[in-house]
Image (cartoon, helix red, strand yellow):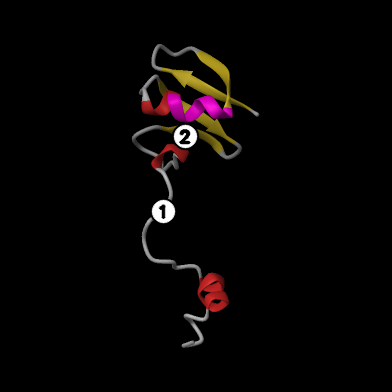
Amino acid sequence: MLIRVRYKDGRIDLVPSKKLDELIIMSEIEEFERSTGWVTLGRDPIRSSLRGAYRGPERRWFTRVKSGKELGV
Protein backbone atom coordinates (compact mmCIF):
# COMPACT_ATOMS: atom_id res chain seq x y z
CA MET A 1 0.00 0.00 0.00
CA LEU A 2 1.30 3.45 -0.88
CA ILE A 3 0.90 6.38 1.51
CA ARG A 4 1.11 10.04 0.53
CA VAL A 5 3.69 11.95 2.61
CA ARG A 6 4.78 15.58 2.74
CA TYR A 7 8.49 16.11 3.34
CA LYS A 8 9.84 19.06 5.33
CA ASP A 9 10.79 20.86 2.11
CA GLY A 10 7.15 20.70 0.92
CA ARG A 11 7.58 17.87 -1.61
CA ILE A 12 4.75 15.34 -1.71
CA ASP A 13 5.49 11.71 -2.54
CA LEU A 14 3.98 8.23 -2.34
CA VAL A 15 5.92 5.74 -0.19
CA PRO A 16 5.32 2.10 0.74
CA SER A 17 3.54 1.76 4.10
CA LYS A 18 6.54 -0.16 5.48
CA LYS A 19 8.71 2.92 4.92
CA LEU A 20 6.39 5.30 6.82
CA ASP A 21 7.66 4.34 10.30
CA GLU A 22 11.24 4.87 9.16
CA LEU A 23 10.45 8.32 7.77
CA ILE A 24 8.68 9.27 11.01
CA ILE A 25 11.53 8.04 13.24
CA MET A 26 14.13 9.83 11.10
CA SER A 27 12.01 13.05 11.21
CA GLU A 28 12.12 13.28 7.42
CA ILE A 29 8.43 14.11 6.93
CA GLU A 30 6.02 16.66 8.39
CA GLU A 31 2.76 14.99 7.43
CA PHE A 32 1.22 11.86 5.99
CA GLU A 33 -2.26 11.28 4.64
CA ARG A 34 -4.88 9.00 6.14
CA SER A 35 -8.32 8.35 4.72
CA THR A 36 -9.59 11.03 7.13
CA GLY A 37 -7.08 13.65 5.97
CA TRP A 38 -3.54 14.85 6.65
CA VAL A 39 -1.84 13.90 9.93
CA THR A 40 0.68 16.43 11.24
CA LEU A 41 3.53 14.86 13.19
CA GLY A 42 3.94 16.35 16.65
CA ARG A 43 0.30 17.50 16.71
CA ASP A 44 -1.89 14.54 15.80
CA PRO A 45 -1.81 11.14 17.56
CA ILE A 46 -0.01 8.36 15.69
CA ARG A 47 1.00 4.77 16.31
CA SER A 48 4.31 3.28 15.35
CA SER A 49 4.97 -0.41 14.79
CA LEU A 50 8.56 0.20 15.91
CA ARG A 51 7.45 0.78 19.52
CA GLY A 52 7.40 -2.94 20.21
CA ALA A 53 4.80 -5.05 21.95
CA TYR A 54 2.61 -3.69 24.76
CA ARG A 55 3.93 -4.91 28.11
CA GLY A 56 1.23 -3.68 30.51
CA PRO A 57 -1.71 -5.54 32.02
CA GLU A 58 -4.35 -7.01 29.74
CA ARG A 59 -7.30 -4.61 29.53
CA ARG A 60 -9.44 -6.16 26.80
CA TRP A 61 -12.59 -7.61 28.32
CA PHE A 62 -12.94 -10.59 25.95
CA THR A 63 -9.39 -11.75 26.73
CA ARG A 64 -9.95 -11.53 30.50
CA VAL A 65 -13.15 -13.57 30.21
CA LYS A 66 -11.48 -16.16 27.97
CA SER A 67 -8.59 -16.57 30.43
CA GLY A 68 -10.95 -16.89 33.43
CA LYS A 69 -9.73 -13.73 35.15
CA GLU A 70 -13.11 -12.01 34.82
CA LEU A 71 -14.90 -15.14 36.08
CA GLY A 72 -12.75 -15.42 39.22
CA VAL A 73 -11.28 -18.75 38.15
Residue toward you, 72 or 48: 72
- The residue depicted at 37 percent of the width and 56 percent of the height is 55
Mark 2, residue position: 39
Main secondary structure found in the magenta portion: helix
Q: What's the CA distance linking mark 1 and mark 2?
A: 23 Å
Q: Position of residue 10 (x, y in %)?
A: 44, 13
Q: Is residue 26 above or below residue 60?
A: above
Residue placed most toward the observer, 67 or 31: 67
Q: Which residues are magenta?
A: 17-22
Determine contact: label 1, label 2, CB under 8 Å.
no
Labelled disc at residue 20? none
Residue at 54% over, 70% down: 63
Q: Which residue is mark 1?
A: 54
Task: Pick whichever of labels 1 and 2 is earlier in the sequence.
Answer: 2
Secondary element type, mark 2: strand
Q: Identify the residue shown where x is 52% and y is 24%.
A: 19
Residue 63 among those drawn in magenta: no
